[in-house]
Image (cartoon, rainbow, N blue to C red):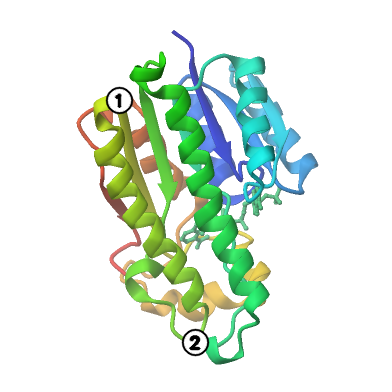
Amino acid sequence: MAKVVLVTGGSRGIGAAACRLAARDGWDVAVNFGREREAAEAIVAEVRAAGRRAVALQADVRDEEAVLRLFDQTEEALGPISGLVNSAGITGRISKLMDAPAEEMRRTLEINVMGTLLCCREAVRRMARSRGGTGGSIVNLSSRAADLGSPNEFVWYAASKGAIDSLTIGLAREAGPEGIRVNAVAPGLILTDIHASAGDAGRVERLTPAVPLGRPGTAEESAEPIVWLLSEAASYVSGTVVDVGAGR
Ligand code: NAP
């Protein structure tokens, strides 16, 4: 049977790397994007060049209607899904909590938490054996921030990733009997655009001395455990959070 995975936030960063590595591992890939259609189309071209099918699909993961449409369009284009990677996420702009605008915190929680919940719900509805599905694997993007707390930067973001850890454990227990594994990957300091988007392009350089391995990670280094968790090689792994923080 064809392996079909939907990657939210597949247009850039860790999600884009997950799309590439999933194609390498034989998955057909639905590349979701929020705003960057060109970036998503470039990833689609790379997946096709690797010999797999791919489609770029716009959807704001905060929007329930858009999420339902995203899953419908994925299955119309590629067939039933058995993989979901929830990589769409933001930090909000760096500040102390006492200076953080409510709208910034709300947007972060809506994308990171509600977006992941909506996509997980839709995936489980389609993968669940009790609803005619054949099971599957879900990988959520947590962060080392869930444990570190991100003081003076974005504690609301850290809180959103704590929520990811809890929902990963809960859903793994709820959906296990449906043949669905649910795990999370918690990257540390990874070289993507997310730091510049947070308003501090020098963040990686500033924090690198705190990383025991002495360097930031690449998006591919975060995506390798993601595609491993998607795969049958991880068939007895569920309800866990894999730290990819180089010891930090
Ligand atoms: P990134 O390079 O900034 O990419 C973010 C991705 O999320 C983009 O593809 C973007 O799509 C998408 N996105 C944002 N808002 C969206 C929305 N409302 N609906 C749909 N897609 C949306 O970020 P990244 O570093 O790869 O981060 C990916 C995930 O890893 C996030 O959940 C992040 O919290 C987590 N993480 C990252 C790090 C790190 O150091 N980089 C560390 C720990 C955890 P468009 O560009 O098309 O809008």
Q: What residue is rendered at 36% in x and 42% in y?
A: 225
Disc 1 or 2, which lies upstream in sequence?
A: 2
Of 168 and 50, nearer the camera is: 168
Q: Is residue 91 above or below residue 55?
A: below
Q: Which residue was labeled with disc 1?
A: 178
Q: Residues within 10 Å of mark 2 (few under 14, many from 20)?
A: few
User: Which labelled disc corresponds to residue 30?
Assistant: none
Q: Position of residue 132 (x, y in %)?
A: 41, 13
- Residue 55, image x, y percentages: 68, 25
Instruction: Using residue 190 as the reference point, say whether residue 104 is left or right of it.
Output: right
Q: Nearer the viewer, mark 1 or mark 2?
A: 1
- Name above or below for residue 72 compared with residue 157: above
In what quadrant of the picture does the C terminus appear?
bottom left
Q: Which residue is mark 2?
A: 152
Instruction: Please give the name of the residue rendered at 42% of the width and 67% of the height, measured from the top-left corner.
Output: 215
**Dot 1 alpha-carbon crowd within 10 angstroms: few under 14, some 14 to 19, many 20 or more:** many
Q: Horizontal placement of 11 versus 120: left or right? A: right
Q: Is residue 200 visible?
A: no
Image quarter where ligand 1 lies: bottom right
Look at label 1 and name its amino acid.
Answer: Glu
Total tally of numbered discs in the picture: 2
Marks 1 and 2 sit apart, C-alpha to C-alpha, by 41 Å
Q: Secondary structure at mark 2?
A: loop
